[in-house]
Amino acid sequence: MEAAAQILPIVAIAAIFWLLIIRPASRQRKEAAQLQSALAVGDDVMLTSGIFGTIVDSTDDELQVEVAPGVVIRVVRGAVASVRRELDADGTPVDPADTPASPDDEEDR
């Protein structure tokens, strides 16, 4: 019985360590892998370096990201930190082609 009482604090520390550190890190890794596998041409992305751009081409492990008009850089999929998508009220992604143009978008005549 004494041996079990001595091991109990070590087991409790290991369980707390798993709950607070290992489990959330594993979940984050899975979410990042899912996000990077779902990348498609036309997605607005932010790279881990903080650069914003639009995906113009993709291969299995590389993306070509346009960061300015006519400026395309080649990056690995792992460099994508997040995808910027507009969501409507019910949480579904908004297609930019479906939104009406505002008067500010019209060219000056």
Image (cartoon, helix red, strand yellow):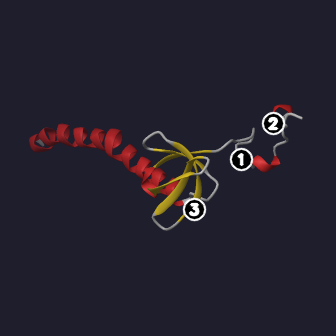
Residue at the top extreme of this rendering: 104
| Residue position for label 2 | 105
Answer whether labels 1 and 3 touch (C-beta < 8 Å).
no
The answer to whether 107 appears left or right of 41 in the picture is right
| Residue position for label 3 | 57
Residue 3 image-quadrant placement: top left
Label 3 – label 2 distance at C-alpha: 27 Å
Within-10-Å neighbours for mark 1: few <14, some 14–19, many 20+: few
Secondary element at image label 2: helix
| Residue 93 coordinates in the image, percent (x, y) | 70, 47
Q: Looking at the image, tell me whether mark 3 or mark 2 is earlier in sequence order.
A: 3
| Residue position for label 1 | 92
Q: Nearer the viewer, mark 1 or mark 2?
A: 2
The answer to whether 18 appears left or right of 52 in the picture is left
| Residue 40 coordinates in the image, percent (x, y) | 60, 59
Within-10-Å neighbours for mark 3: few <14, some 14–19, many 20+: some
Residue at the front extreme of this rendering: 109
- Quarter placement of the C terminus: top right
Q: Nearer the viewer, mark 1 or mark 3?
A: 3
> What's the residue at 43%, 49% (across, down)?
27
Answer whether labels 1 and 2 touch (C-beta < 8 Å).
no
Q: Nearer the viewer, residue 40 or 1?
A: 40
Residue at the right extreme of this rendering: 109
Q: Nearer the viewer, residue 108 or 75?
A: 108
> What's the residue at 79%, 50% (across, down)?
97
| Residue 69 coordinates in the image, percent (x, y) | 62, 47
Q: Looking at the image, tell me whether mark 1 or mark 2 is earlier in sequence order.
A: 1
> What's the residue at 19%, 37% (across, down)?
9
Q: Looking at the image, tell me whether mark 1 or mark 3 is earlier in sequence order.
A: 3
- Residue 17 vs 72, above or below: the answer is above
Secondary element at image label 1: loop
- Residue 102 vs 62, above or below: the answer is above
